[in-house]
Image (cartoon, helix red, strand yellow):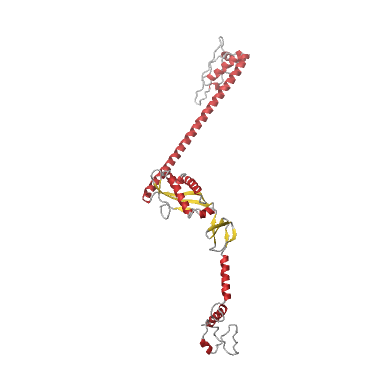
Amino acid sequence: PWVGEDPARKLRPPRSRPSLRQQPSRPAAGSAPSPRGPHLDELTRYVRTTLSRAVLRPSGRGVRTGVVVGALALAAIAWALTGVYEVGANETGMVTRFGAFEGETGPGLHYHLPAPIERVRQLSIGVQPSLDAAAGGEGGAPGPMLTRDAQVADVDFSVRWRITDPYKYLFQSAEPEALLRHAAEAALREVVSQTSFMDIAAAGHGDAAAKAGALLQATLRHDDMGVASEGLLIRDVEPPGAAQTGFHDMASAREGAQIAAGDVGAYRDRVMAAARGDTAKLIQAAQGARDQEISGARGEADRFALIDAQYRKAPDNTRERLYTEMMERVLHDTRKVIVQMPKGSGGQIVLPAELFRSKAADAPAPASAPQGQTQGQAGQASGQTPSEAQPGPTA
């Protein structure tokens, strides 16, 4: 009702409107203060009136021109500010004007014409999140793969990749990530078809992942989509659902066989180590005996050379000494004493009792020598002159 003019209002006297700026009069002394404050309806009515006077024309019909111009200016400024954008450190900005490529911007704060004139797409030029492909063939994932030995395997793999050329990545293909996933699956299928199920299902999956990664990189280089592979990882290999029970039993049996083979290998190593130790001891003992024999032989040879030199100087004395030494070695442990009495001698030979003692503890005491033999006769009995005779016989 405050927008248009009411003809009936001209007939009524104007009604005074309370002003919010007017301070309420203080109550007289002794009178009670009014418990009521400004009414909410009056405040709402005041705000409406103020806005209508600021926006609408004085006639109450239509909006003021300044208000329209100001609103349009604010809208234009807000629209222009939408062209401000910032590119991160590992990103690049691809600017397109009406869908056509306009330019590439590096890291920092930039400006482009607001949409829909120009648009910008920020791409990360570092390593992208891995493309995962779960086994089972559901949700766009690869289906079962056939191995070299005609076995079926569900392979779960992931691909690490990065953008090498942002322009080719955006404009060379419509869905580069989907093409990358299909290329990785094709490369892996080719490698799996050349590998047995046992090799690819073993721990580490052999070299299948490395071969598939190299084949994928060659395919991406040939297609030139602006992306490169950083590696293909085989996460898990399982048989189809119906054969998983038998596969797990076979894996358990293989693990048990490996454990048994490890035990056999450990026992073999222990036996071989003991045999090698015994062999080394025998070899060392044989080498010691050989060295001892060689040293003894060399000593005997040197001793013989010395004796030969002495024999050349005094043959008779050397011959006598050799004979005496040989008799000492031969008769060393005997209990008998042989005394040769020269003709016409009647003396006694008294021999020391310790000469007749055997090395054994239980040896009986020897009998005394015959009476009537002198010590000089004993020296003659040994083949020596009286001056060279020794106190006792040669054993």
Question: Which residue does the image show at 57% across and 78% down from the upper left?
Answer: 54
Answer left or right for 88 relative to 151. Answer: right
Image vertical order of residue 359 relative to residue 72, above or below: above
Answer left or right for 256 relative to 342. Answer: left
Question: Which residue does the image show at 53% across and 19% down from the upper left?
Answer: 330
Which quarter of the figure has residue 196? Answer: top left
Quadrant placement of the C terminus: top right
Which quarter of the figure has residue 111? Answer: bottom right
Quick one: 317 or 64, which is closer to the camera? 64
Any part of residue 123 in sight: yes
**Percent coordinates x, y for residue 261 in the rendering:** 42, 41
Any part of residue 395 in sight: no
What count of labels does the image hold? Answer: 0
Quick one: 125 or 377, which is closer to the camera? 125
Quick one: 293 or 259, which is closer to the camera? 259
**Percent coordinates x, y for residue 296 in the rendering:** 56, 23
**Percent coordinates x, y for residue 145 in the rendering:** 41, 48
Question: Which residue does the image show at 61% across and 13% down from the upper left?
Answer: 315
Image vertical order of residue 188 relative to residue 301, above or below: below
**Percent coordinates x, y for residue 323 in the rendering:** 56, 16
Farthest residue, direction right: 313
Image vertical order of residue 39 relative to residue 328, above or below: below
